[in-house]
Amino acid sequence: MVNVGLAVKRTVYLAFTCLLCACSKPPTPYSWDLPHNVPPPVMPHDNPITVESVELGKALFFDTALSGNHTTSCSSCHDPALAFAEANKVSVGAHGDSLNRNALALVNVAYNATFTWAHNGLATIEEQIMIPLFNEHPVEMGVTGNEERILKRLRSPAYKQLFNAAYGDDMPSMDHIVKALASYVRSLTSFNSAFDKYAYGGDDKALTTQQVKGLNLFFSERTECFHCHGGINLTQSTIHAAQPLVLRPFHNTGLYNEDGEGGYPLIDTGLMSVTHNPEDMGKFRAPTLRNIALTAPYMHDGSIASLEEVVDFYARGGNHREMKNRHRSPFVKGFVLTAEERTALVAFLESLTDTEFVEKHKKPTIL
Amino acid sequence: MKNVARFTVIPALLFALLGCAELGFGEREPGEIPFSLTGVETAACPMQMKIGESKWRVDYFGMYISNPAIRVDGKWHSVKFKQTKWQTPTSALLKFHTLCRNPEEGNDSIVLDVSEKLLKLSTNLRFTVGLPFDENHANPLTQVSPLNDSSMFWSWQNGHKFLRLDLSNTADVDKSWSYHLGSIGCESDAAVRSPEQACAFTNRVEVILPMSQLDYDLGLALSVPTITAQVNLNDSKGCMFESPEAQPCRQLLKNLLVRPWLTWD
């Protein structure tokens, strides 16, 4: 009897120890699945990416519970089938308010030197995420004033488990929500297009002859495309572990010229609306061109419908070329393409689509 | 057991009553400075204000003030706020529009952590409308109350609104007007420069008020129409500092700097 009692004690003790171990199991460091030519992104010290934080962020990203009125999720404007961009010209918030801008694709955002279409005051994705969550003018997700209601929705057993696994605390908090969303968005890396296979994988058959022709045009001084859309992420606005220097170039492409001085419509003056420096009139960040064929319509306000029209826009040197525009980037100087070359350039842009990325990041089942 | 309970409850009750008697119902605590709104119908709920022929509903009115100081014998002395859910030692949030419906969700006074004696010796009170740079730009989700009040977040500017006044026309609910004041044009990469230089417009307003030994326990009167003086609310949607140097932002900021919007009551 004594031995049986001892065995029971030992079993209980072991079970208790195991339980403690399970509770205190640290999150699993996230393993970046990157090609040899791509360095890892720079990570913030206060939000290390883990397998568990990515998993929680993914669940939250697709969940309408995160909006005040339970109607809208991050994926409402960032559709994974469209490389996390949207087909609408501009986004519409949870209360039906139209925003000024087209939702950016969420592709390699971990490598962004700046966030949103035009902002030099946001150092991290975490800071950017605060905008769609808490903005009230216009309302985007409508979290402000609804925090308790939202947190209550996230107290299901499934979410409790996810929060606990990610942050050792099963009670949801807005800070952990933002951190998890940032981790998930950082995990959306895309470096496996036909272009990558051709350029970095050494696979000569990955691109068609037409696409190679387009590639050569893209990286030529004739079109100047690569000056703003160069580097591993096909945007100058890139930062990574091997290049921590913060480059934050913004450009006025000449999309508008309201006053013959390069002025943009007052509804959106780009970087100037943030810096209040007149020199920043109409300047926007060059977005990545990875998966660009999936993210129509184009430009900050979704005002250009197709890639062909974007090529035509740059070929004519921006809009209102006949008017003076001191803000227009010197790289937008216009060029002449034959119909065949135009088609080749668009074919090259289409080779930047990473089908594996789209396949991998399909909308999950909601918790 | 009954006696024990009686002996415990009665002294507690007496103590509580004495405590109340000492403070007095509705009386202020040492260092407390109440704010009362003028030019606003505070009896209405929500509050309303008449400007010209139009009546406007006050949907939101709140502001942060920080870095309080008093002047004694000609020298400024920094003082602290008593720490409550409305105050950190350096910053306080005043929030008026919620007072009529949910008084516990509003705050119309500040409480300085100073003795009555020192307050009596003071000849000036000084504070800033706004938040210090570090508190303004730290992660608001992990800050203590009242810095974590999301209705004062200004995420687009990666900071807080220092002052927020949202009005809507009572005759036309679609007509709204907002004044959001805060630091703007703040760059994120501040390592290469001092923080204050990192903002193109800091938009903090310093307030200095006279004090005297006789009137040390006065309250402050805050005139909302003075804040919006010489601004036609029907002409624009207000000022959220998209264009700081354009009207009505220029006039609104000028009002805070030169007009007597805050006076002893």
Image (cartoon, coloured by chain):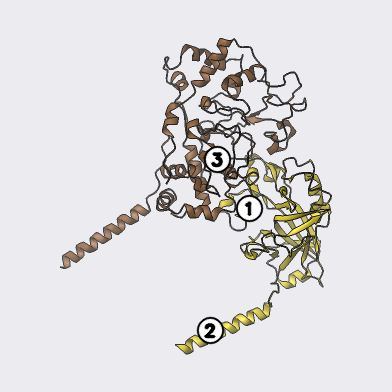
Give the distance between the C-alpha atoms of the residues marked 3 and 1, in whole angstroms. 21 Å
State the residue in front, A158 or A122: A158
Q: What percent of the width, then of the height, locates residue A311?
A: 60, 19
Q: Which residue is denoted by mark 3 in the rendering?
A: A125
Give the distance between the C-alpha atoms of the residues marked 2 and 1, in whole angstroms. 42 Å
Query: Can you tell which chain is drawn yellow?
Result: B
- The N terminus of chain A is located in which quarter? bottom left
Q: Specify whether B170 is left or right of A22.
A: right
> Which tag, 2 or 1, sits closer to the chain's start?
2
Whether residue A144 appears in this view of the structure is yes
Q: Residue B73 carries which label?
A: none
State the residue in front, B189 or A334: A334
Q: Specify whether B238 is left or right of B187.
A: right
Q: What percent of the width, then of the height, locates residue B23?
A: 68, 77
**Chain to which mark 1 belongs:** B
Whether residue A34 appears in this view of the structure is no
Q: Which residue is denoted by mark 2 in the rendering?
A: B9
Tell me: residue A8, above or below residue A288.
below
State the residue in front, B194 or B142: B142
| Dot 1 alpha-carbon crowd within 10 angstroms: few under 14, some 14 to 19, many 20 or more | some
Q: Residue at x 42, y 31 (%)?
A: A359
Q: Which residue is denoted by mark 1 in the rendering?
A: B151
Residues flagged by tags 3 and 1 on a common chain: no
Residue B158 lies in quadrant: top right
Q: Specify whether A330 is left or right of A131.
A: right
Between label 2 and label 1, give the one nearer the viewer: 1
Q: What percent of the width, then of the height, locates residue A6?
A: 20, 64
Give the distance between the C-alpha atoms of the residues marked 3 and 2, in whole angstroms. 56 Å
Q: Which residue is drawn at 73% across and 66% down?
A: B34
- Whether tag 3 and tag 2 are in contact, CB under 8 A, the answer is no
